[in-house]
Image: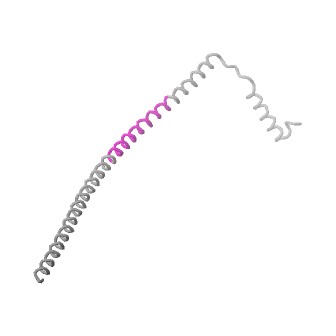
């Protein structure tokens, strides 16, 4: 009855195939050892690839860090030069300010001297006029 119906017959064949696949298979010690060695070889190869990749990344990172270090060193040197130039400019400006102050004091002193001289001249003229 089942084999007369095509769909049921197809299902029955599929079940037989699954049943065969689920049966325990005999594995010899040789097969197990070979399979174990294959897995171990693949695992070692994967680990070696990971190590190689990490070494390559390390080399790249080392190069990047060296370049970054030299860039930072260059920036430090430029900063040092700039600060020295600035300090020099500030020193020059301080010297100019000091000279200007001294000159202003001289001018004020000259004015005071001129004023005294004028006052003395006025006094003398007033005395002569009396």
Residue drawn at x 77%, y 35% is: 14
Q: Where is residue 51 in the image (x, y as percent from the top left)?
A: 48, 30
Residue reaching furthest to the top: 29
Q: Where is residue 78 in the image (x, y as percent from the top left)?
A: 30, 50
Q: What stretch is highlighted in magenta?
A: 48-74
Q: Where is residue 33 in the image (x, y as percent from the top left)?
A: 60, 18
Quarter of image, res 67: top left
Quarter of image, res 108: bottom left
Lateral position of residue 107 relative to residue 26, left or right: left
Q: In this view, does 12 lie above or below 77?
A: above
Q: Is the magenta stretch mostly helix, strand or loop?
A: helix
Quarter of image, res 69: top left
Q: Is 56 colored magenta in this rendering?
A: yes
User: Looking at this view, is 130 or 63 the one in front?
Assistant: 130
User: Looking at this view, is 122 or 20 the one in front?
Assistant: 122
Q: Position of residue 38 (x, y in %)?
A: 57, 24
Q: Is residue 61 above or below residue 87?
A: above
Residue drawn at x 44%, y 33% is: 55
Lateral position of residue 117 relative to residue 75, left or right: left
Image quadrant occupied by the N terminus? top right
Residue reaching furthest to the left: 128
Lateral position of residue 5 relative to residue 99, left or right: right
The mark tally for this picture is: 0
Q: Is residue 94 above or below residue 115?
A: above
Image quadrant occupied by the C terminus? bottom left
Residue reaching furthest to the front: 130
User: Looking at this view, is 83 or 97 the one in front?
Assistant: 97
């Amino acid at each position: 009855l089942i084999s007369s119906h095509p769909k049921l017959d197809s299902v029955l064949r599929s079940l037989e195939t699954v049943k065969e696949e689920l049966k325990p298979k005999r594995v010899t010690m040789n097969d197990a050892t070979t399979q174990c060695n294959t897995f171990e070889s693949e695992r070692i190869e994967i680990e070696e690839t990971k190590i190689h990749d990490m070494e390559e990344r390390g080399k790249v990172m080392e190069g990047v860090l060296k370049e970054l270090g030299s860039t930072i060193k260059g920036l430090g040197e430029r900063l040092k030069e700039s600060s020295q130039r600035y300090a020099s400019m500030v020193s020059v400006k301080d010297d100019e300010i000091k000279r200007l102050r001294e000159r202003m004091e001289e001018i004020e002193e000259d004015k005071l001297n001129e004023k005294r001289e004028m006052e003395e001249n006025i006094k003398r003229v007033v005395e002569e006029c009396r």
